[in-house]
Image (cartoon, rainbow, N blue to C red):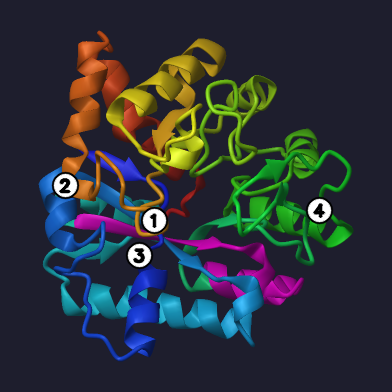
Amino acid sequence: MKAIDLHCDTLSALRRAHKEGAELNLAENDLQIDLAKLEKGGSLIQCFAAFVFLKGEEDPFAAALEEIDEFYAAMERWPDRITPVKTRADLERVLAGDKIGALLTVEEGGVCKGNPALLRTLYRLGARIMTLTWNFENELAWPNDIDMATGASVPNNANGLKERGREFVAEMERLGMIVDVSHLGDAGFWDVAHMATRPFIATHSNARAVCGHTRNLTDEMLRAVADKGGVTGINFCGSFLDPGEKPYSTAKWMADHIEHIRSVGGIDMIALGSDFDGIERELELNDYSKLPLLEAELHRRHFSDDEIEKIFCGNALRLLKEFLPEN
């Protein structure tokens, strides 16, 4: 089964390793994603996030550019195995060929420093999806309140999009950059839902009714995403899957969330958003090559081939075809 994964933090891991002087590359490494693992797991398109830890960088936009440089350096080094996807023409070539497609995204709208010119620059560089926040307040919006030390979280129902955040949502829709509400606070989510004129997505968020962490979406939020024609990508992180204490991640728990989301918003809103290379390694699916374990679990639960195809790639593919420019 071919798959589209809407979110990973591999670029950040590569940049960090290279700054520390380590020899690490995308072809084969000890991370959760490399080309060998993607090929073994059936990757059609991998979305690579330029993730920036906002409070750890002197210049967050420069940090994002360094990760984007990691992205294109890998594309240039292994052009026979992976190719960037910026347009529908690129997408069609991937669908017709045997290379993995690579789509650039941004995790942390604060890298733009509230400047729409920097947003447009990221789009010109190929970024096609962006979260408005990570876990810190920025010029655009507030996240939910998350204790970075313990992981405890509380919904933020008071502070949503700032005025500049509203401007960014409108500009992203104009550009054709998909608004990503993963990490956004509850109030901000509803601001996006109310003003959005195009589909928006949560690249790596699960169902809060199954696991109560505020990184997940409530049933009402799931319906709002579905009503706009968007998707939510199932996050493989145990903290966002397991309703208990143990932060272990299994295909069974992923399927629990998938079943719940299907019952709330329908099969057409479910996608994959692994969060690989940004999550702990105590995982049953501990790298991309293990993705067939989730397919097998869904078959055991009597999901049809058509339903699994929609989850693994069809729903995300529909959105990419809608948003990507023709050439």
* Marking on residue 289: 2
Q: Where's residue 183, x and y in %? A: 62, 49
Per the image, the residue denoted by label 3 is 10
Mark closer to the chain start, 3 or 4? 3
Mark 2, other Cα within 10 Å: few <14 / some 14–19 / many ≥20 = many
Q: Nearer the viewer, mark 2 or mark 4?
A: 2
Mark 3 and 1 residues: CB-CB less than 8 Å, in contact? yes
Work out how far the residue at label 1 is from the one at label 2, CA to CA, in angstroms: 14 Å
Q: Residue at x 50, y 44 (%)?
A: 203
Q: Residue at x 80, y 40 (%)?
A: 187
Boundaries of the magenta span: 100-123
Q: Nearer the viewer, residue 160 or 318?
A: 160
* Marking on residue 8: 1
Per the image, the residue denoted by label 4 is 166
Work out how far the residue at label 2 is from the one at label 4, CA to CA, in angstroms: 39 Å
Mark 1, other Cα within 10 Å: few <14 / some 14–19 / many ≥20 = many
Give the structural element (helix, strand or loop) at label 2: helix
Q: Where's residue 236, x and y in %? A: 38, 41
Give the vertical position of 166 relative to 58 (above or below): above
Q: Amino acid at mark 3?
A: Thr
Give the vertical position of 82 relative to 194 (above or below): below
